[in-house]
Image (cartoon, grey):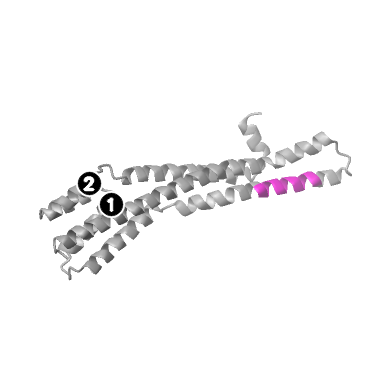
Amino acid sequence: MSIIDYFLKGGPLMFPILLCSLVSVAVVCERLYRFRQARLKDPLFLDRIKEMIKDGKVDEALRECKQAKNPIGNVLARGIEKSHYSGCCKNLSEIEKAISHAGQQELRELDRYMPTLATIANIAPLLGLFGTVTGLIKAFMVIQQLGGKVNASVLAGGIWEAMLTTAFGLSVALPTVVAYNYLVGKIENFSHEMQDSSVELLEVLHEKQIV
């Protein structure tokens, strides 16, 4: 039998499992694309920004941070703007708050759709189990109607068809869990990079006695 035949024999709960699969693939592809864009492509980016600030080229440093169009660049840009162009008291705590707020915004963007992926990883096997249970109930109802006069092959056929939903549910959940953990690891890496970059920026600003 083809995969379509197996799918159809699994019953109506195969369709929500299929929907979970499609959503999972869409979310993973979208997040991978977003993370690819967010990646810091130039390893010397931070060193260049620090040198510009030390040389007094603040406008140039801010412009380069904005042109980077990645989380680290956005966070650094917010810190530079706060320290130079906000018009408020230029103290370290205020700039730290601005950088922290910008970092939280970037992390929320990176974390988008991740709860959806976690939900799919949890409900896909449960949908499969639910389909198996309902399938077994139907199979045993038929056995009861026949007065228990059912041979082993008929019983086995009903059981394996009922268990198809569990198999499909697990086939969706397992790769989704792997993808989720991989993406969470990427988000944590972005978070550490933003924190490290923020600390280095604050050190440079402090050295220049700007704050």
Q: Amino acid at mark 1?
A: Ile
Residue 72: image tag: 1
Mark 1 lies on a secondary structure that is helix
Main secondary structure of the magenta stretch:
helix
Span colored in magenta: 129-140
- Residue 185 horizontal/vertical position (percent): 42, 49
Count neighbours of disc 2 (C-alpha within 10 A) and say few if under 14, some if 14 to 19, many if 20 or more.
some
> Is 127 situated above or below 80?
above
Count neighbours of disc 1 (C-alpha within 10 A) and say few if under 14, some if 14 to 19, many if 20 or more.
many
Mark 2 lies on a secondary structure that is helix
Q: Can you identify the residue that label 2 sits on?
A: 45
> Is 107 situated above or below 176?
below
- Judged left or right of residue 9, residue 199 is left
Looking at the rendering, in which quadrant would you find the N terminus?
top right
Q: Residue at x 61, y 33 (%)?
A: 4
Q: Amino acid at mark 2?
A: Phe
For marks 1 and 2, give the CA distance.
10 Å
Q: Is residue 40 magenta?
A: no
